[in-house]
Amino acid sequence: MTQLVIRVLHSEKAVIYLEAPTTEGYVIGRSDDASSYVPDIDLASFDAREKGVSRRHSALVRYQGTTCVVDLNSVNGTFLDGRRLIPDVPHPVGKSSEITLGTLSLTIAHL
């Protein structure tokens, strides 16, 4: 099984390790006091709200044997290596990619 490492840029402590998605994916977003919803990858502690991250912003999924990112119709968009993604369309994540949610940037790498 492949592992992914997610790093929040400009934050030395922000590293998340997880198994690459198989049949189920991971929702990336933020929790807050106004909702009981908590995404699988919660970026609230990285000023996600102030940086335009939606509660259900994007998802990491497995599509056609590849790890992909999907924008979940977020207000401020999801960007993969600088390109804005079309919502609801899986986009392959490379060996190492930069994903920006609103203005919060992450790197995702396969181990």
Image: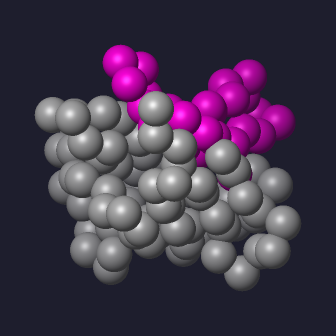
Q: Can residue 76 be seen in this view?
A: no
Using the image as rendered, state which of residue 29 and residue 23 is in the foreground. Answer: 23
Q: In this view, does 58 lie to the left or right of 45?
A: left
Does residue 94 sit above or below 68 in this rendering?
Answer: below
Residue at 59% from the left image edge and 54% from the top image edge = 5
Magenta highlight on residue 31: yes
Q: Which colour scheme is used?
A: one colour
Relative to 56, 50 lies left or right: right
Q: In this view, does 93 lie above or below 102?
A: above
Q: Tell me which segment is drawn in magenta.
A: 18-43
User: Is 98 on the left or on the right of 52, as rendered?
Assistant: left
Q: In the image, residue 19 lies at what x, y percent?
A: 54, 35
Where is residue 53? Give x, y as percent. 57, 56
Quadrant of residue 9 within the rendered picture = bottom right
For residue 59, above or below residue 46: above
Whether residue 26 is visible here, answered yes or no, is: yes
- Tell me the chief SS of the magenta region: loop
Determine whether 36 is above or below 43 in the image: above
**Front-most of residues 14 and 28:** 14
Q: Residue 18, image x and y in percent? A: 61, 39
Where does residue 32 sit, x and y in percent of width and height? 76, 40
Q: Is residue 47 magenta?
A: no
Q: Which residue is found at the position 33% from the left and 79% from the top?
A: 82
Identify the residue at horizontal 77%, vertical 74% (top origin). 11
Count of marks placed on residues:
0
Q: Nearer the viewer, residue 2 or 99?
A: 2
Image quadrant where residue 105 sits: bottom right
Residue at 35% from the left image edge and 18% from the top image edge:
23
